[in-house]
Amino acid sequence: MIFDTHAHYDDQQFDIDREILLRSMEEQGVGTIVNASATVESWQKVLKLTEQYPFLYGMIGVHPDEVGALDEARFQEMERLLQEEKMVAVGEIGLDYYWDNESHDIQKKWFIRQLELARKLGLPVNIHSREAAADTMQILKEYGQGMKAIIHCYSYSEEMAEEYVKMGYLLGIGGVVTFKNARKLKEVVQAVPLSHLVLETDCPYLAPEPNRGKRNSSIYLQNVAKAIAELKDMTTEEVIQITEANAKAFYQI
């Protein structure tokens, strides 16, 4: 079944129909979802979702745009929550130089601290990196060696993808791969072994074609799997099966 490795069902865009949508997942072919945290405020919402839905797991972390909210007390709270039964990763964490909501130094500080916490707890990490390719790679080479990581919503070069594969990391592939102008990502998907790819939505964002611009959900991952299958000359079912196995091994679910 489909495994969505990165979703945001705590987002207010799902407030109107969250329960109906999530309860329909199994019949739509979606077997497992991991819900990422982006803000300190999202932590309790994510925890509650993991308690409500047997197929939904969580990760606790702070998105680089939001790290200004972190302090030592909240960092201790993050460590405590990560030890809850269904928390399977630290995320989403990383660097974002596109919006520049926080200074690069503050982003780097908390990225490194969260990587160190993941290592301490023996957890994998889910990495957000936008317009920050070189600094992300440098920090992961220094602080992330030997760890399990997904580079969420992968958007960089084929050469960098190959470097991440050598480090044992996985690449998260979502709706963008279905876009006509996503030539670079399509080349990455063709070049990287399927053993290093996982499916993700980042919902409610980045819906694949033909739903681009609408609210995304895990149900649309069928379209992403189909696009990957066409690029790799495989069946959609093979892509779903292999990426599900990759994700289950990564999150130890």
Image (cartoon, helix red, strand yellow):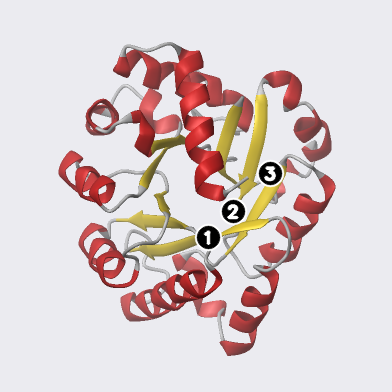
Alpha-carbon distance for marks 1 and 2? 6 Å
Mark nearer the viewer, 3 or 1 = 1
* Residue 86 location (% of width, % of height): 71, 55
Kind of element beneath mark 3: helix
Res. 95 image quadrant:
bottom left
Q: Is residue 123 left or right of residue 188?
A: right
Kind of element beneath mark 1: strand
Precedes in sequence: disc 1 or disc 2: 2
Alpha-carbon distance for marks 3 and 1? 20 Å
Residue type beneath disc 2: Ala
Precedes in sequence: disc 3 or disc 1: 3
Compared to residue 127, the image places residue 180 above or below, namely: above
One can see residue 206 in this view: no
Compared to residue 236, the image places residue 102 above or below, namely: below
Mark nearer the viewer, 3 or 2 = 2
List the residue tagged with mark 3.
13
Viewer-side residue, 189 vs 95:
189
One can see residue 87 in this view: yes
User: Mark 2 and mark 3 in contact (Cβ < 8 Å)?
Assistant: no
* Residue 134 location (% of width, % of height): 20, 62
Res. 70 image quadrant:
bottom right
Compared to residue 233, the image places residue 207 above or below, namely: below
List the residue tagged with mark 2.
36
Label 1 packing within 10 angstroms: few (<14), some (14-19), many (20+): many
Compared to residue 178, the image places residue 165 above or below, namely: below
* Residue 242 location (% of width, % of height): 47, 27
User: Mark 2 and mark 1 in contact (Cβ < 8 Å)?
Assistant: yes
List the residue tagged with mark 1.
91
Residue drawn where x is 68% and y is 49% of the image: 57
Residue drawn where x is 71% and y is 44% of the image: 56
Label 2 packing within 10 angstroms: few (<14), some (14-19), many (20+): many
